[in-house]
Image (tube, rainbow, N blue to C red):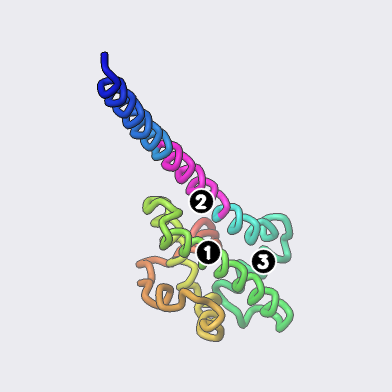
Amino acid sequence: MNWDAISAISQLIGSVAVVLSVLYLALQVHRSTRVAKLATQDAAATALRDVTKPFMENADLERIWRVGLEDLSALSAEERARFFHAAYQWLKAFETIHFHYVYGLMDRQLWEGWRGLLQHYIAAPGIAHYWKLRPEVFSESNFVNALEPPPEQRTVGTLLAEEQT
């Protein structure tokens, strides 16, 4: 065997090794991207749970949220302020969830569920009133304004009213 043949074989082996390395790296990047996507989706769900968890743990906050969604005039000025703080946090969580979807960090199927929930709540009289007062503090106002109201608004307040009838 001459040196030219040995050199050609070495170059072939080196080229195959480079191709295999690139394929391995592509597989690793794909896997890490999927893990990052799942972590982002979990973080989005956690953010909304963190906003709504106090409603479950505190009966007064739950009442303010439930009543405020449907009839702000039934709340005192202090309770309306608390409702507005909760509405701000709730809408900010949805803003983040929407950005995760827009930037490809959330699966479409998962986003559709979140969007459906947002449609119901943004149509609730209390949130709709807050939204009219403060759209400038949200970067996704065009998206939210374009949402069509659902045929039947279903929030925690309206679902509980259905159970009682």
Q: Residue at x 55, y 69 (%)?
A: 91
How many residues crowd mark 3 within 10 Å: few (<14), some (14–19), many (20+)? some
Question: Closer to the camera, 93 or 26?
Answer: 26
The mark total stands at 3
Looking at the image, residue 96 lies above or below residue 106: below
User: Is 41 contained in the magenta span?
Assistant: yes
Characterize the magenta stretch by its predominant secondary structure: helix
Identify residue for label 2. 41
Left or right of 146? Residue 156 is: right
Identify residue for label 3. 63
What amino acid does circle 3 point to? Arg
Quarter assignment of residue 51: bottom right
**What secondary structure is found at the residue carrying circle 3?**
helix
Left or right of 32? Residue 3 is: left
Looking at the image, residue 130 lies above or below residue 90: below
Part of the protein shown in magenta: 27-43
Quarter assignment of residue 112: bottom left
Give the alpha-carbon distance from disc 3 to disc 1, as whole Å. Answer: 26 Å
